């Protein structure tokens, strides 16, 4: 897997930017986790979920990766519907 399988066609500029950011994190593991999630979900997220997702993308990889892999518990201040969707999608991923 080398990158997005989803076209950005039909997405508004903000969602296109988030899709790009999802696939260009810095750590390949995070690219795969968040990029795959964004490919599947970016077009259907609500406005509130887009805001949540953007806040999650602002978390540095070194802090975020242990949360999505279960190495560290999720702090209450970032636990949200979108993070729960990411965690659920992560459980079904195979690399």
Image: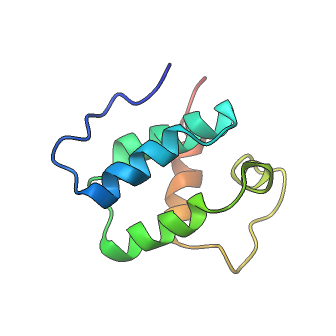
Image coords of residue 77 (percent x, y): 69, 80
Q: Is residue 80 left or right of residue 61?
A: left
Callout count: 0
Image coords of residue 28 (percent x, y): 65, 31
Q: How is the image coloured?
A: rainbow
Q: Residue at x 58, y 37 (%)?
A: 31
Q: Residue at x 55, y 33 (%)?
A: 93
Image coords of residue 68 (percent x, y): 69, 51
Q: Residue at x 65, y 74 (%)?
A: 78
**Which residue is the extreme one toward the right?**
71
Image coords of residue 88 (percent x, y): 54, 51
Residue 57 visible in the displayed image: yes
Q: Is residue 19 left or right of residue 2?
A: left
Quarter location, residue 30: top right
Quarter location, residue 75: bottom right
Quarter location, residue 8: top left
**Which residue is the extreme one toward the left?**
10
| Closer to the camera in the image, 38 or 71 | 38
Q: Is residue 91 above or below residue 41?
A: above
Residue 44 visible in the displayed image: no
Q: Residue at x 74, y 66 (%)?
A: 74
Q: Is residue 27 left or right of residue 16?
A: right
**Which residue is the extreme one toward the top?**
1
| Closer to the camera in the image, 87 or 66 | 66
Quadrant location of the C terminus in the rendered image: top right
């Amino acid at each position: 897997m080398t990158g997005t399988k989803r076209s950005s066609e039909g997405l508004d500029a903000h969602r296109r930017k988030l899709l790009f950011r999802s696939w260009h994190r810095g750590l390949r593991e995070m690219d795969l986790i968040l990029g795959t999630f964004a490919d599947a979900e970016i077009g259907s997220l609500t406005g509130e979920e887009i805001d949540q997702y953007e806040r999650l993308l602002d978390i540095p990889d070194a802090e975020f990766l242990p949360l999505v892999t279960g190495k560290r518990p999720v702090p209450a201040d970032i636990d949200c519907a979108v993070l729960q969707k990411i965690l659920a999608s992560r459980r079904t991923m195979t690399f």
